[in-house]
Image (cartoon, rainbow, N blue to C red):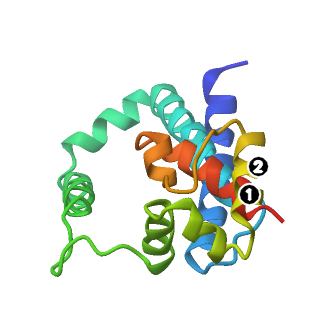
Amino acid sequence: MKLREWATPLTIGSFTLIAATGILMFFHWDSGFNKTVHEWLGWGLLAAAILHAAANFGAFKRYFKNRTALIVIGVCLLILAASFVSPPGGDRKPPHIAATLAITNTPLSVVAQVANKDIAVVLDQLRRAGIEATAQQSLKQLSGGKRELEMKGLAAIFAQ
């Protein structure tokens, strides 16, 4: 089987998957594993695109001699560069991110109140998740700044 016979269908399929999950996330219609699929299988799209370019290398090279193609590629690169610039007014985060950051920086005794739980229950939930804590500590202090550990703590506290 030739590379082109499966690289192009893989590119089409992975693009469709990434486009669909991206649209779902944009309109906040995502559920289940949509975001996880989008993030991780984006690597599949990258691999498929590389394989597709390799399978069609002659045609791929010609685009770098075409003025219109170079303009389109250049505009896309400029948009990518601009995406790293913070908008005027600072690095404001979406409200749900700001709330999460506030909770992870707050002592667990206060987080327990927000979760409508007794502090002993919260500390027990954290202990069962492998996190030893006191009521005065915050998840940020406990995690040493490791976001994954903060999220593990939040999941333990706010699990239904």
Residue 124 numbered mark, or none: 2
Task: Provide the residue designation for mark 1.
Answer: 120
Q: Residue furthest right?
A: 160
The image shows residue 35 at horizontal and vertical percentages of 64, 58
| Number of numbered discs on residues | 2
Residue 62 numbered mark, or none: none
Front-lying residue, 143 or 85: 143
The image shows residue 43 at horizontal and vertical percentages of 55, 38
Asked whether, in this view, residue 66 is left or right of residue 155, the answer is: left
Asked whether, in this view, residue 100 is left or right of residue 66, the answer is: right
Picture quarter with the N terminus: top right
Picture quarter with the C terminus: bottom right
Q: Is residue 1 above or below residue 80?
A: above
Residue found at x 19% / y 74%: 90
Front-lying residue, 15 or 9: 15
Residue found at x 49% / y 55%: 138
Mark 1, other Cα within 10 Å: few <14 / some 14–19 / many ≥20? few
Q: Is residue 72 above or below residue 97?
A: above
Label 1 sits on what residue type? Ala
Residue found at x 68% / y 41%: 9
Residues tagged 2 and 1 counted as in contact (Cβ below 8 A): yes
